[in-house]
Amino acid sequence: MDIIVVRQGATDKEVRQVVKKLEGKGFKANISKGTERTVIGVIGDTSKITEEESNTFEALPGVEKVLRIIQPYKLASRSFKPENTLIKVGRHVIGGKKIQVIAGPCAVENMATLLKIAEEVKKAGAAFIRGGAFKPRTSPYSFQGLREEGLRYLAETRKKTGMPVVTEIMDPRDINAILEYTDIIQIGARNMQNFRLLQEVGSYDKPVLLKRGLSATIKELLMAAEYIMSEGNNKVILCERGIRTFETETRNTLDLSAVPVLKGLSHLPVIVDPSHGVGKRHLIPPMAKAAVAAGADGLIIEVHTHPENALSDGEQSLKPDKFRVLMNELRAVAKAVGREI
Ligand code: PEP
Ligand code: MN
């Protein structure tokens, strides 16, 4: 027993009774009020619930039926919530008809460069500014990010441009600063299975952009989303950013089939990061267009005014003029698949 479907017209008192009974048995309840129906997700080890016990729930007033979910993820699954999840950030909606574009430098380097890049990508049609203040670098001797100073520059950029901010968290100890200065918390590929970090961001009402791990299966990505959602935060955006394969021509192998697969298995919005997916500037436009054609709800793209001087990922950063051309091309692709950008 994983899901309790509430009968149409059931009273709040009846729903509370179901929740109380669940809690009495040591489970937590996650209530999802959809347009069609309300369902209660049962959080905990549901394999221990016997058939008889499950029947006692079905007999409660206000309960239409009790369902079992075959997948190991529950709250993230489409069987739990058939309709697409829409995540509102300021005046923007992620997961709706409009494809949302997040753009900006890999890392926040200084105020002037960040602001200039933000103004450029905004003019081209991006809604969100990205930039890492805490950078997960392969070498401890590479630039690690400006930390809190970088977060302050992001907040200042938001104030000046009105663009909501996306930035990465690497350590639960930074959560308060991240919550204060940013709008969407990014969990990077290297931390996709940092379960303590997932639980931390799951306990706040702040959207989370969850990137697929370097060698993670789609199921593992959804289980990571489940970690966040089981703490109460349903605002998870899934991100395909390329996986490790035997191929060496590209930085990673961008698995675009993950987009329709994820959209089928889950109600969560799915976005694509072609920059880290391929790692080479000239390959980003074709893969961004392919991502939109494949049904992505958004894109996250690295842009830098002087990629040759960038402190990280310059080789995969688009210059603003190329980004503008890409945005125009994306409009036509979006239209062809019934979306807008
Ligand atoms: C990034 O977005 O700059 C980043 C480090 O991404 P990923 O975690 O996907 O490598
Ligand atoms: Mn990067």
Image: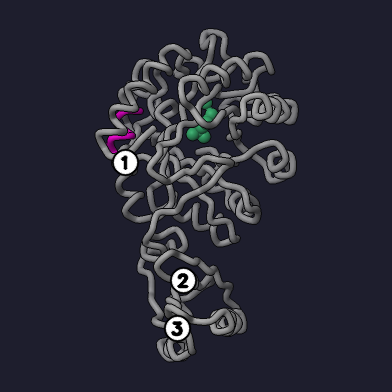
Q: Real-space Cα distance between discs 1 and 2?
A: 27 Å
Q: Residue at x 34, y 31 (%)?
A: 253
Question: Does label 3 or label 1 sit earlier along the sequence?
Answer: 3
Q: Residue at x 35, y 68 (%)?
A: 70
The amino acid at mark 1 is Gly
The quarter holding residue 24 reads: bottom right
The amino acid at mark 3 is Val
Q: Residue at x 68, y 28 (%)?
A: 159
Residue 242: image location, x then y, percent:
39, 34
- Which residue is denoted by mark 3 in the rendering? 63
* Numbered mark located on residue 38 in the image: 2
Image marks 1 and 2: residues in contact by CB distance under 8 Å: no
Image marks 3 and 1: residues in contact by CB distance under 8 Å: no
Q: Is 313 placed left or right of 83 in the picture?
A: right
Q: Real-space Cα distance between discs 2 and 3?
A: 10 Å
Q: Is 70 placed left or right of 130 in the picture?
A: left
- Which residue is denoted by mark 1 in the rendering? 295
SS for callout 1: loop
Magenta range:
288-295
Closer to us: 111 or 314: 111
Q: Real-space Cα distance between discs 3 and 1?
A: 35 Å
SS for callout 2: strand
Residue 272 is at least partly visible in this image: yes
**How many numbered badges does the structure rendering display?**
3
Residue 185: image location, x then y, percent:
60, 41
Q: Magenta stretch containing residue 203, yes or no?
A: no
Q: Quadrant of the C terminus?
A: top left
